[in-house]
Image (tube, rainbow, N blue to C red):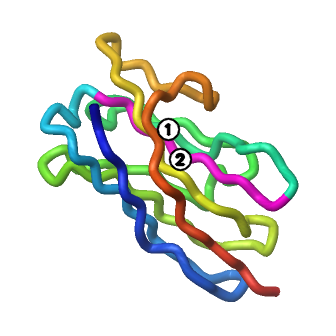
Amino acid sequence: QVQLVESGGGLVQAGGSLRLACAASARTFSMYAMGWFRQAPGKDREFVAAITLTGGNTYYADSVKGRFTISRDNAKNTVYLQMNSLKPEDTAVYYCAGRRTLTGAAGLTTNQYGYWGQGTQVTVSS
């Protein structure tokens, strides 16, 4: 069992940056692939980024590739999402997700993750 708590959301102007953090309670954090998803009003929750157990592989949605960077610090049980060059269309609630895996594979869909945080609001003004 793992609990996830996001932080770092807020209001930012277009072109600005934010860094989200997700703190995990699990002592075996290094056995969880981690992902970030987002959900805008009236839309389905969508994949943003994912990272494997040791951070050796990362994956991104096309819409954020080159602007967002996912990383993790297993010593701090924390995964990060650095968001640069933000656009109004990035406005959404951002969710951290955890997936316990023995193979190390990261998931790209919501149904591959069993643990979710409560979400943090990111609003980008034009």
Q: Amino acid at mark 2?
A: Trp
Coordinates of residue 99 in the picture (x, y in percent): 41, 27
Q: Amino acid at mark 1?
A: Ala
Give the farthest residue toward the top.
103
Tell me the residue at 16%/32% (across/down). Answer: 28
**Helix, strand or loop status at disc 2:** strand
Coordinates of residue 1 in the picture (x, y in percent): 27, 31
Within-10-Å neighbours for mark 1: few <14, some 14–19, many 20+: many
Quadrant for residue 74, please give it.
top left
**Helix, strand or loop status at disc 1:** strand
Coordinates of residue 107 in the picture (x, y in percent): 53, 25
Report whether 1 appears left or right of 38.
left
Tell me the residue at 29%/55% (across/down). Answer: 23
Residue carrying label 1: 50
Coordinates of residue 44 in the picture (x, y in percent): 79, 44
* Location of residue 37 with respect to 7 vertically, above or below: above
User: Is the magenta region chiefly helix, strand or loop?
Assistant: strand
Q: Does 34 lie within the magenta span?
A: yes
| Mark in front: 1 vs 2 | 2
Q: Does 111 lie within the magenta span?
A: no
Tell me the residue at 71%/43% (across/down). Answer: 46
Q: Could you say which disc has been placed on residue 103 in the image?
A: none
Is there CB contact under 8 Å for labels 1 and 2?
yes
Chain part drawn in magenta: 32-41
Mark with earlier residue (1, 2): 2
- The residue closer to the viewer here, 74 or 114, is 114
Q: Could you say which disc has been placed on residue 36 in the image?
A: 2
Q: CA distance from mark 1 to mark 2?
A: 6 Å
Tell me the residue at 33%/32% (across/down). Answer: 56
Q: Quadrant of the C terminus?
A: bottom right
Report whether 70 appears left or right of 15.
left
